[in-house]
Image (cartoon, rainbow, N blue to C red):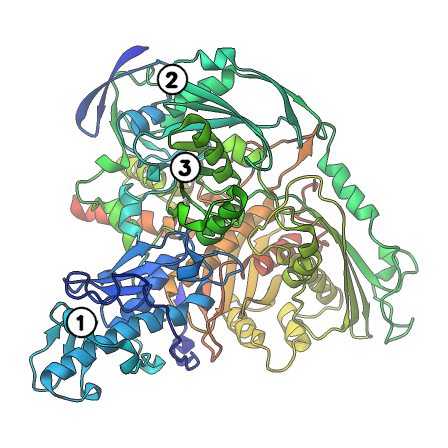
Amino acid sequence: MGRFRLQVNGRRQVVDVPGDTPLLWVLREELGLTGPRYGCGVGACGACVSLIDGAAGRPCVRTVEDADGARVTTIEGLSEHGDHPVQRAWVDLDVAQCGYCQPGQIMTVVALLARVPDPSDAQIDEALRDNVCRCGTYPRIRSAVRRAASLVRGAS
Amino acid sequence: MTVSRRTFLGAALVVAVPVPALAGPAAGAGPAAGLTPNVFVRVDGRGRVVATVPRPDTGQGVRTMAAVLVAEELAVEVEDVTLEQAPGDTATYGSQAVANSTSSRQLATPLRTAAATARCLLIAAAAARWGVPAAACTARGGRVHHPGRRPLAYRDLVADAAALDPATVPVTLTPPERWRLIGRTRAGRSDARDIVTGRARYGAESAPRGSLIAVVARPPWIGAQVAAVDDGAARAVDGVVAVVRLAAPAAGQGGVAVVASSTAAALRGREALTVTWTGGTPAADSRAWLDELEAALPPAGSPVRPGGPGTAFPGAAADGGADPYLRRVYRMPLLAHAPMEPMNATAHVTADAVRVWAPVQDPGGLRTQLARSLALPEARIAVTPTLAGGAFGRRIEPDAVLEAIACSRAAGKPVSVRWTRDDDTRHDSYRPMSVHRLTAALDASGLPLTRTHEVVTWPLTVLPAFANPAVVRASGDHFPYTVPGDVSVALRPAPIRTGFWRAVYAGQFGYAEECFLSEIARHGGHDQVAFRRRLLPAGSRLHAVLDAAAAKAGPAPAGVACHLEYGSAIAVIADADPATRRVRRVTAAVDVGVPIHPSGVIAQVEGAILDAVSTVLGAQITVRDGAVVQSSFRDYAWARIGDCPDIDVIIVGSQAPIGGLGELAYPPAAAAIASALAGPEPVTGMPYGVPVG
């Protein structure tokens, strides 16, 4: 067992768990943040993507020991009222079907737009390459990324 | 996305049907309970419209569809409808199975009737209060209106309405020409905000607080059974509370469950187990399976010969010497469902009851099935369906639920069984492999005179054996063209679990038939669209969708396919670059009679097209040394956003009744995409251009 410090969605948290525990289970089962979904546990699907120190990270393949001291933002911490531009774009364009992968898609796009405010189609495809949507919402995800980019630019 | 203007002309007249009243004391219980005229709809004491959705939402959008239907008939907006999910209870709700693309067909009229009943009661209550004829009153915006009176809000009418005898109030459905929402609404998915904020609750999020977590050590090769377990090390893992042997079929597919206080502890415990396995088929190989299916094809005879032996196919010499017929064999792979949310279920077994929370496709059927297998009355079994992170046919099967029940019984607490992605990929109930030989005799102009479709495949192990021959035929045989011929099906014993996969056998049959038709057209020098138009019977609904797709896609398309099933019609046209294996554009035109929620209709077609892209480009399950090779999306090559073509979905209106849609687009999309990718080459299987099996 170890004692690990995290700053999650702006709050300081201390957890007592074995150091090899994947961060995903710490978020979901110790801290009750279930927005990051379990989809594969091996970093292959992207359903759990959250911001780790500002970049898109995969809590399912990051141990809590490795993440000690990190700042983590999950989908729950993205906006107080669910109105972040990326979330608004997702609702406006009716992206989701089952919705299970969408928190990970959204957080990946948040990180993308922070780096590249006006991404090309190729940059969108590259950023979301390892985010699987089994329902096939990709056409709408593409449109929603463009919509979100214009909303972010409009806001700044 | 495109919605044609003709969309709204359609819609046959639908009459109200009886909808069961709520049994028990809540029925018509006055202001506190509000107005509860039936099991699907109530208007509560605050005037809030609440719809009870009888079938689970697996991403197909049945909750949104219910909201649209109820909002239409109760004259409110889609977002004004509060949705509740019905528990498993077929006696109250009828069939609750998300299966065979039936939800819209079977639920639209009952849900509309349910809401229209509430509206008519509210209007009757207002009319009585005003002393005017009900016919002079209308409902709009959550209020009842009459010229010259101040409108009355539903909340001020529910008590009066609840006191009326529903049998005395005639119920009328809103006629199609007055629809504001059905087929017209621009509303998005009802659960969209919960989804984008992470608040949506799937299986794992619906487990009661304090549930233990279990993961299962599963057979390392097909059919292996537990011979011995050394669980000492597993029990010593911090957090592990029990190790439970699961015996198939009463406890799912068999294995050893490790029950713990957390997922991480359960996984560590499973890692520490030493299980000795026996039996099964450790040498099984899916290439050999496919070869065995092909070897079981009947001897290649001649099809019926209306044109006589002189009706040789022009390219016949290249296809087998003197064989005057075109023949082609198609080899189809195993496919996994791979929903984003892996299989899971939570159960709490107590002395006198069993409670289940799980993403399932048929909560009512599951409850009945559990009552039988557990020898309990249904009243002691509660099944709460959660949102499902995809299903595609997989969640019809109760295996995860049976595991959870066995674990909870052993642990004496609620237990949530979680499958890892590896479990989900390697222990699925797969779409069966199949081999199809198609034979055609052609006339001088290259049109097919006859066709023979010989199929060798496996049954669905999820079904009782006796049911399979009829199911294979009913699901697979939907050839919509006027070519006389014969379809024969031979079933060989399934060497692996098989189950329903989106479109079931139509996925294999339709793929082979349309790829074959494309090849015939190409060899005869025919335009793919004109060729099909010529072969379709006069009056087929496919003419209109084929024309609409062709008009949008442009001239001389390479990949074209049609499908007519579930009371709906679709044509799909694909454009691809054979050199780079890139699917550039897919155009689909669909006639579902009444497109209740247009955005949802388009989404279902888009999703099926991505399934087609995935399975044609390379996703397949293979078996070597007795085990499934693939273990996650890393090697089960599902399409990524970069593989996604530009997609146009056109909704074509018609006078047909409401049709089903969830599975409709997959078979023709796969055939059109494969034919476009193949260019001048023949398609010989799925995936295209990759060894099958």
Q: Residues within 10 Å of mark 1 (few under 14, many from 20)?
A: some
- B675 sits left or right of A90 in the view: right
Corner quadrant of residue B208: top left
User: Regarding mark 2 in the picture, which secondary structure is present there?
Assistant: loop
Per the image, the residue denoted by label 1 is B141
Q: CA distance from mark 2 to mark 1?
A: 55 Å
* Residue B543: quadrant of the picture: bottom right
- Which residue is the site of mark 2? B239
Q: Amino acid at mark 2?
A: Gly
Please say whether residue B366 is visible from this viewpoint: yes
Earlier in the chain: of badge 2 and badge 1, it is 1
Q: Which mark is residue B346?
A: 3
Instruction: Mark 3 vs mark 2: tell me if same chain.
Output: yes
The residue shown at (42%, 18%) is B240
Judging depth in this view, the residue of B500 and A40 nearest the camera is B500
- What residue lies at 52% left-to-right and 59% top-to-bottom? B586
Residue B479, image x and y in percent?
A: 67, 67
Q: Position of residue B215 (x, y in %)?
A: 47, 27
For badge 1, the amino acid type reads Gly
Query: What SS does tag 1 mark?
Result: loop
For mark 3, does the 10 Å Cα neighbourhood hold few (<14), some (14 to 19), or many (20 or more) residues? many
The residue lying toward the viewer, choosing from B639 and B582, is B639
What is the secondary structure assignment of the residue under circle 3? Answer: strand
x and y, in percent, of residue B353 in the image: 40, 41
